[in-house]
Amino acid sequence: MRVLITGAAGFLGSHLAERCLEADYEVIGVDNFITGSRDNAAYLDTFAGFRLIEHDISQPLFVPDEIDGVLHFASPASPVDYLELPIQTLKVGSLGTHNALGLALAKEARFLLASTSEVYGDPMVHPQPETYWGNVNPIGPRGVYDEAKRFAEAITMAYHTYHGVEARIARIFNTYGPRMRPGDGRVVSNFIVQALRGDPLTIYGDGSQTRSFCYVKDEVEGIFRLFHSDRVEPVNIGNPNEFTIRQLADTVLEETRSSSELQTLPLPKDDPKVRQPDISVARDVLDWEPQIQLREGIQRTLPYFQAQLDKYDAKARTI
Ligand code: NAD
Ligand code: UDP
């Protein structure tokens, strides 16, 4: 098996690449490092079966090798990133998905799209089953990400229907774990870094909004199983245990034994009020459900962030 993973230097892409390498696949990573990490790429380079092509997938890509699978993970994913990179986000979700699908078609490879719970927007149905069509503001700040992913799903289904590409669509819910960038702005990385530094934990709004957090190892296992399944229609992959942002802050404070205070900041526009995956399809079709719950996942993630901060502090001392 040889698979090509776009976004392989990112958080999820690097874990997925590692999962494939562990299964003895050859992996070709494609990344332009717009939000990715050279450290992740260097780590993957230690596997004999890995090689990286530095390339912007919003531009066409020609690869001479035979390829059995194309897994399209390239896209800014943190709201902070995609608000700073709105056009690149729209392009990689649309043109990038088109190019990745074109590659899959040319190579007669299976295609998997990293879609998102954001296709449900600020949901009016709770929890969210795959049959829910969503509530997205197309011209709001989050529209650049949400609509790009909705387009990506549409073109993936069109390539399946009209060109016969074997398609899989993972609707990924909030995932966390080692290899997130400490400064990527998402809530779990922000809270852990703030708690470890003794800085205030920044709660946007009153903190009553909810998310359902999945540990990266569980998430990647679900995606890996979906890739190997026969399911064409989208599948929610996430942890259905739902927490308010305040509950998350309390859990991080307890696990880090930090005395950081809580600081309230304005809620960003169109921030979804609730989010929880209905994972009945994943349970049924993939025989999958998450094994690692929030507290344990945070315990497993802390040493990584501590090491990142130590590295940063050591560098600062040498300047
Ligand atoms: P990330 O920012 O850590 O990784 C994204 C990677 O894609 C980075 O390495 C970046 O450099 C690369 N990239 C971006 N645009 C590119 C382009 N035009 N050409 C080549 N490479 C490009 O984000 P992540 O959390 O690892 O997310 C990966 C994928 O999973 C994204 O498609 C995201 O939408 C999806 N997703 C993630 C989550 C989550 O909670 N992490 C939730 C839903 C969906
Ligand atoms: N959030 C927060 N403080 C932060 C970062 C995020 O309260 O420092 C909130 C954010 O407003 C949202 C939730 O945490 O309600 C999850 O945000 P994140 O950026 O992780 O992902 P989202 O699910 O919004 O894409």
Image (tube, rainbow, N blue to C red):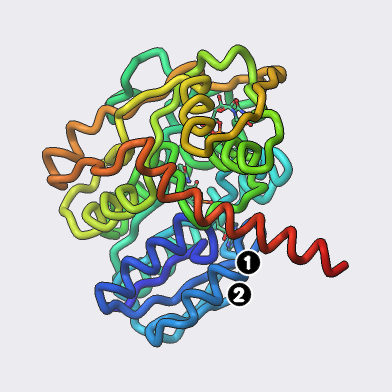
Which of 258/54 is in front? 258
For the residue marked with disc 2, what is the amino acid?
Glu
Quadrant that contains the N terminus: bottom left
Name the residue at 54% across, 68% down: 40
- Tell me the crowding category of disc 1: few under 14, some 14 to 19, or many 20 or more residues within 10 angstroms, Cα based: some
Residues at marks 1 and 2 touching, judged by CB atoms closer than 8 Å: yes
What numbered label is drawn on residue 54? Answer: 2
Residue 257 against residue 264 in the figure, above or below: below
- Tell me the crowding category of disc 2: few under 14, some 14 to 19, or many 20 or more residues within 10 angstroms, Cα based: few
* 273 on left or right of 172: right
Residue 187, given in percent of the width and then of the height, sits at 57, 34
Name the residue at 44% across, 37% down: 174
Name the residue at 31% across, 20% down: 127
Quadrant that contains the C terminus: bottom right
* 47 on left or right of 283: right
Residue 253, given in percent of the width and then of the height, sits at 53, 31
Residue 224, given in percent of the width and then of the height, sits at 27, 58
Which of 89/268 is in front? 268
Residue 87, given in percent of the width and then of the height, sits at 69, 46
Which of 139/263 is in front? 263
Residue 98 against residue 290 in the figure, above or below: below
For the residue marked with disc 1, what is the amino acid?
Asn
Residue 275 against residue 319 in the figure, above or below: above
Name the residue at 39% across, 76% down: 27
Q: Which residue is mark 1?
A: 32
Q: Secondary structure at mark 2?
A: strand
Q: Rounded to the nearest whole Å, what is the CA distance between mark 1 and mark 2?
A: 5 Å
Residue 196, by quadrant, is top right
